[in-house]
Every structure is written in structure tokens, then in C-alpha cells.
Image (cartoon, rainbow, N blue to C red):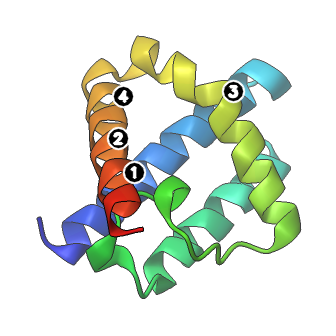
Amino acid sequence: MDVNTKRQREKEVVSLMIGIYCRKKHGGKSLCPACAALDAYARERSDQCRFMETKTFCSNCRTHCYRPDMREQIREVMRFSGPRMIFYRPVMAIRHVTESKKEKKRLEEQG
């Protein structure tokens, strides 16, 4: 898979997770200003990632390029939305889990 495809998948997964989180936590049909800012920030960080070729998803990356406050927000979103993704985009959710597990195993083997 090429870098641009991986980058686009990363952004799709994160945006979906932020959307699920925002709808359930903040109500409404569109992103609230705080969640829209988090989504824009996550997309910008993904666009600038120098490690996209060697990782599957940001959650597996050993170099955490998010500011600490944004990192904590995205972790909260992922903890909440991750299990719920199966109801919204089952194929994407299964692919994300499968690829994440493969990446974690590869990283463990590298030490």
C-alpha cells in the first residue's frame, strides 16, 4: 500500500472516530467546534507524518507527535469510539484491528 493511501486511511479512521465521539458525547449532527478542531489537528499531523511508510496507524507509532493536550483528547476519542466503530463501519473496524495487531507484533519482534 502506498503512503498516500495509508495517510488517507488514517485520516478516515480518525475522522470517523471523532464523529462517533462527538455525536454521542456532544449531540448534534455535525462536529462541535472542539471536535472539529481536534479533527483538523489530527489530519494536519497525519499529513506531516514522516513515519507513514513504516507504521499502520498513529495509535501504534512510537513517536507521538501530538501536543500532550491533543494526545489526551485523541486517546479519549479512541477509547470511546474504537469499540463502537463496529456498528458504523464494520469492515473498516475489522481492518483497523487486524492491521494494528500485525503492526504491534512486528514492533515487538523488532524489540
Mark positioned earlier in the residue sequence (2 or 4): 4
Q: Distance between the residues labelled 3 and 2?
A: 19 Å
Where is mark 3, residue-wise? 80
Q: Which of marks 3 and 2 is in front?
A: 2
Q: Which mark identifies residue 35?
A: none
Closer to us: mark 2 or mark 4? 2
Q: Distance between the residues labelled 1 and 3?
A: 21 Å
Classed neighbour count for the residue bearing mark 3: other residues with Cα under 10 Å, few (<14), some (14–19), many (≥20): some
- Residue 88 visible in the shown view: yes
Marks 3 and 4 in Cβ contact (< 8 Å): no
Q: Which amino acid is tagged 4?
A: Ala
Name the residue furthest right.
69
Name which residue type carries label 1.
Answer: Lys
Q: In which quarter of the image is residue 100?
A: top left
Eye-nearest disc, 4 or 1: 1
> Do tag 1 and tag 2 residues touch (Cβ < 8 Å)?
yes
Numbered tag placed on residue 93 in the rendering: 4
Mark 2 residue type: Lys
Q: What residue is at 11 percent from the left and 64 percent from the top? A: 1
Give the mark nearest the N terminus, 4 or 1: 4
> Which of disc 2 and disc 3 is earlier in sequence?
3
Label 1: which secondary element: helix
Is residue 51 toward the left or the right of residue 95 in the image?
A: right
**What is the secondary structure assignment of the residue under circle 3?**
helix
Number of the label disc, if any, that sits on residue 101: 2
Q: Is residue 1 above or below residue 74?
A: below
In the visual, does 7 lie left or right of 34? left
Q: Is residue 59 above or below residue 1?
A: above
In this rendering, position of residue 20 left or right of residue 85? right
Q: Name the amino acid, label 3.
A: Phe
Circle 4 crowding by C-alpha within 10 Å: few under 14, some 14–19, many from 20: some
Q: Give the residue number, with chain letter if any, for mark 1.
A: 104
